[in-house]
Image (spheres, grey):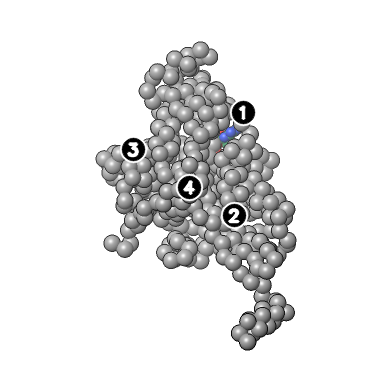
C-alpha cells in the first residue's frame, strides 16, 4: 500500500544525540487555585534528572520511592518548578537551532495534561517568552553573527490541528488540505509562509496566531484543550567559500500538543476502546505511532491522523527530536502526572534515523564570474 509509510532501516553510525529522542520533564509551580483547594506537592525533582512521585512526598520520603516501581523516573533532564524559560530552551532546543544552521531538521514537542504548562513552555508571555520566541532570538543572533544580510531567509508557518481539520493560524480561513510532496514531505496546501526579519516581530505574530486557536465552545476565551499548534521555521542559508558557496536548508518544528488527559494509552487494546469514546483522534494516533516506534515495528501508522501525517518527519525521519513532558506537582493531578511520566519514560526508547545535513554546492551567478568560468572551460578544451 503506497499510502502507508513503511520505515526504512536506519543506517547506524552517523547518529547524533545518541540516535534517539531526548526526553525532558518540566514541573510547574503549584498554582494559587491548587493551593486554595488544599493541594500538596506529590512530585519531587532531584539532581536535575530524577523525578519521584508519591501520594504525599515529605522531604525524607522520596528516597524510599527508589524501590517502588513506576514511582522513580530518570530523564535526560528534569526541571524543578523554579526553572526559568531560558534554561529550558538552552537544554532542550538550543542544539537543534544550531543543527538547523547546519542544514538539519529538528523538532520539539510539549506533552501533558491541560493546565500542566505546555503553552507556557512553548509560547510563554510577552514578558516571559517561551521556547518558540527564544528559538527565533537565538536563530537571528547566530545568522547575523555568521553571515551577511541577504544571505539567509527565515520563513515561518503556524497551524492548528483541531478535530481533524487543519487551519492556518497566521491567516485564518477555510481548512487546509494535506498532500504528500516527494521533496518536502507532508505539506498543507495554501498555508502562509511568512518571511521574518526579527524575533520581536515574530513574538507579536505568534501571540496573534495563538489568539486564532480554536476556543472551547463553552468558554469563549479559553483555548481548546483539543487544539494542537505547530510552528514551523524554515531557514535557507548561504555559506561562502572561495570559489563557490554552499546552500543549507534546515527546518525546526515546535509543537504545542493538545491536553493528553484520558488519551494516554500504551497498548493497542486501550487505544481501540478509546477510539469509540470522544477522544482526540490525533493524540491517539500519536500514541499508536509512538508504540509502533518503541516496539520497532516496520509499519508506522502515520496516516491515521492529521497530526501524525504532519509529524511523520519529526518522529520517524532523519530529524533531531526533543520531547518536553509538562506536569503539575499537585496531588490532585496524581493520575495524570503518573500517566505523563510513564508515557515520557517510554518515549526515551524511540530511535531516530541518521540526520544528514541538507546542503547543496553552488557556483556564483554574477556575469563576470560566469564569464571567467567559461573562459577557463574554453582554455581547457583547446
Ligand atoms: P497548558 O497549555 O498545558 O494547558 P498552560 O501553559 O496554559 O497549560 O499553563 C496553565 C497555567 O499555569 C497558566 O496560567 C500558566 O501561566 C501557568 N504556568 C504554567 N507553567 C508555569 C511555570 N513553569 N511557571 C509559572 N507558571 C506556569
Ligand atoms: Mg495550552
Q: Which callout, 1 or 3, points at the residue further toward the start of the chain?
A: 1
Q: Position of residue 363 (x, y in %)?
A: 64, 71
Q: Secondary structure at mark 3?
A: loop
Q: Label 4 vs label 2: CA separation?
A: 15 Å
Q: Label 1 vs label 4: CA separation?
A: 33 Å
Residue in the image at 54% along x and 60% along y: 358
Q: Residues within 10 Å of mark 4 (few under 14, many from 20)?
A: some
Question: Which quadrant of the figure has residue 169?
Answer: bottom right
Q: Give the side of residue 279 with respect to residue 131, left or right.
A: left
The residue mark sitting in front, 1 or 4, is 4
Which numbered circle lies on residue 102? 2
Q: Secondary structure at mark 4?
A: loop
Judged from the image, the quadrant occupied by ligand 1 is: top right
Please tell me whether residue 1 is drawn above or below residue 34 in the rendered image: below
**Ligand 1 has an atom within 8 Å of the beta carbon of the residue at disc 2:** no
Q: Which residue is mark 4?
A: 15
Q: Which callout, 4 or 2, points at the residue further toward the start of the chain?
A: 4
Question: Which quadrant of the figure has residue 244?
Answer: bottom right
Q: Which residue is mark 1?
A: 82
Question: Which quadrant of the figure has residue 263?
Answer: top left
Residue in the image at 48% along x and 38% along y: 23
Q: Which residue is mark 3?
A: 266
Amino acid at each position: 500500500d503506497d499510502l502507508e509509510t513503511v520505515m526504512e532501516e536506519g543506517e547506524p553510525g552517523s547518529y547524533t544525540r545518541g540516535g534517539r529522542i531526548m526526553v525532558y520533564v518540566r514541573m510547574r509551580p503549584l498554582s494559587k487555585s491548587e493551593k486554595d483547594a488544599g493541594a500538596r506537592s506529590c512530585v519531587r525533582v532531584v539532581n536535575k534528572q530524577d523525578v519521584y512521585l508519591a501520594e504525599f512526598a515529605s522531604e525524607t520520603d522520596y528516597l524510599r520511592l527508589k524501590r517502588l516501581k513506576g514511582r522513580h523516573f530518570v530523564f535526560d533532564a528534569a526541571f524543578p518548578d523554579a526553572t526559568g524559560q531560558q534554561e529550558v530552551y538552552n537544554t532542550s532546543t538550543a542544539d537543534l537551532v544550531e543543527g538547523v544552521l547546519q542544514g538539519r531538521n529538528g523538532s520539539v514537542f510539549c506533552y501533558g495534561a491541560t493546565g500542566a504548562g505546555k503553552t507556557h513552555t512553548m509560547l510563554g508571555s510577552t514578558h516571559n517568552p517561551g521556547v518558540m520566541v527564544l528559538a527565533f532570538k537565538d536563530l537571528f543572533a547566530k545568522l547575523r553573527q555568521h553571515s551577511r544580510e541577504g544571505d539567509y531567509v527565515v520563513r515561518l508557518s503556524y497551524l492548528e490541528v483541531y478535530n481533524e481539520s487543519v487551519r492556518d493560524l497566521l491567516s485564518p480561513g477555510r481548512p487546509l488540505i494535506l498532500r504528500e510532496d516527494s521533496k518536502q514531505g507532508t505539506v498543507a496546501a495554501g498555508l502562509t509562509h511568512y518571511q521574518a526579519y526579527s524575533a520581536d516581530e515574530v513574538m507579536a505574530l505568534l501571540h496573534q496566531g495563538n489568539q486564532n486557536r480554536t476556543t472551547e465552545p463553552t468558554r469563549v476565551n479559553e483555548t481548546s484543550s483539543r487544539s494542537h499548534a505547530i510552528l514551523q521555521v524554515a531557514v535557507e542559508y548561504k555559506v561562502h567559500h572561495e570559489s563557490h558557496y554552499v546552500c543549507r536548508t534546515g527546518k525546526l518544528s515546535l509543537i504545542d500538543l493538545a491536553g493528553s488527559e484520558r488519551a494516554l494509552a500504551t497498548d493497542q487494546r486501550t487505544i481501540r476502546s478509546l477510539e469509540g469514546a470522544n477522544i482526540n483522534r490525533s493524540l491517539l494516533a500519536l500514541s499508536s505511532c509512538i508504540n509502533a516506534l518503541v516496539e520497532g515495528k516496520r509499519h508506522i501508522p502515520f496516516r491515521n491522523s492529521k497530526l501524525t501525517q504532519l509529524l511523520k518527519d519529526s518522529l520517524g525521519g532523519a530529524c533531531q527530536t526533543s520531547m518536553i513532558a509538562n506536569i503539575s506537582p499537585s496531588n490532585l493531578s496524581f493520575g495524570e502526572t503518573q500517566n505523563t511520566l510513564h508515557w515520557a519514560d517510554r518515549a526515551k526508547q524511540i530511535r531516530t534515523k541518521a540526520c544528514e545535513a541538507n546542503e547543496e554546492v553552488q557556483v556564483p551567478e554574477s556575469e563576470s564570474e560566469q564569464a571567467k568560468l567559461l573562459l577557463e572551460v574554453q582554455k581547457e578544451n583547446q
